[in-house]
Image: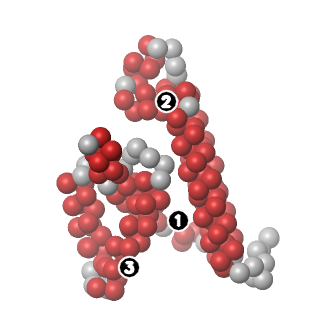
Amino acid sequence: GWAPSRAVRPDVYYVTTAILTVLACLATARYLSSGAGMLCEAVAENEIRLEYLGASPRKVAFIVIVVAAALSGLGGGLLAMSTGHVDPLMTNWTTSGGFVFVALLAGRGSTIAPVIGFFLLELVRNYALNFAPNAWQMILGAVMLTVILLLPEGLWSLVERRRKA
C-alpha cells in the first residue's frame, strides 16, 4: 500500500488539518444556510409537516448522511496520514463515544460548536488525567452529566442566550 513520507514534518499535518477543518466548517455552514440546508432543520422540527410541504425527509436525510460520511472519510484519511497506518483498534467504541461526548458537550446550532467542544473535551481530559489518572473517566462522566442536566442544549446554548440578550 501507500505510506506517507516521513520526511514531512508533523506541523505540516497540523496546519493541513486546521485548514481543512476551517474549510469543512465554512462549507457546512454555507450548506445549512441554503434552502437545502434549511430542510435539515425542518426535518428535525417536524418531519410530517415537511412531507405536507412537498419535500422528502428521506432524501434530506440521505444527503446529510452522505455529507457526514464524506467528512468522516476526510477525517479518517487525515488520521491515516498522520499516524502512517490504519488499525481496527482505532474504531474502538471509546473513539465513537468521544464523538458523542463532543456532540453532547457542544450542542447544535453552529458548525464551530463541535470544534470548540472537542477542545474543551481535550482540556477536561488532560486535566482529569493529570489530576486523577485512575479516575479520569469518572471525571469526564461527571462533566457530561453536569452539562446534560444544566445545559440540555449543550454549551453553545450559552452563546445563543447571550446573543438574544
Q: Residue at position x 27%, y 80% from top?
A: 135
**In the image, what residue type sits under mark 3?**
Asn
Q: Residue at position x 64%, y 58% from top?
A: 20
Q: Quadrant of the C terminus?
A: top left
Which disc number belongs to residue 126? Answer: 3
Is disc 1 placed on a helix, strand or loop?
helix
Please tell me which of labels 1 and 3 falls first in the chain: 1
38 is higher (above) or lower (below) than 68? above
Instruction: Point out the frontmost of discs 1 and 3.
Output: 3
**x then y, percent, for residue 144:** 28, 62
33 is higher (above) or lower (below) than 143? above
* Residue with the mark numbered 1: 91
* Residue with the mark numbered 2: 38
**In the image, what residue type sits under mark 2?**
Met
Along the line of sight, which residue is nearer the eye, 165 or 102? Answer: 165
Instruction: Point out the frontmost of discs 1 and 2.
Output: 2
Mark 1 to mark 3: distance in Å?
21 Å
**x then y, percent, for residue 12:** 69, 74
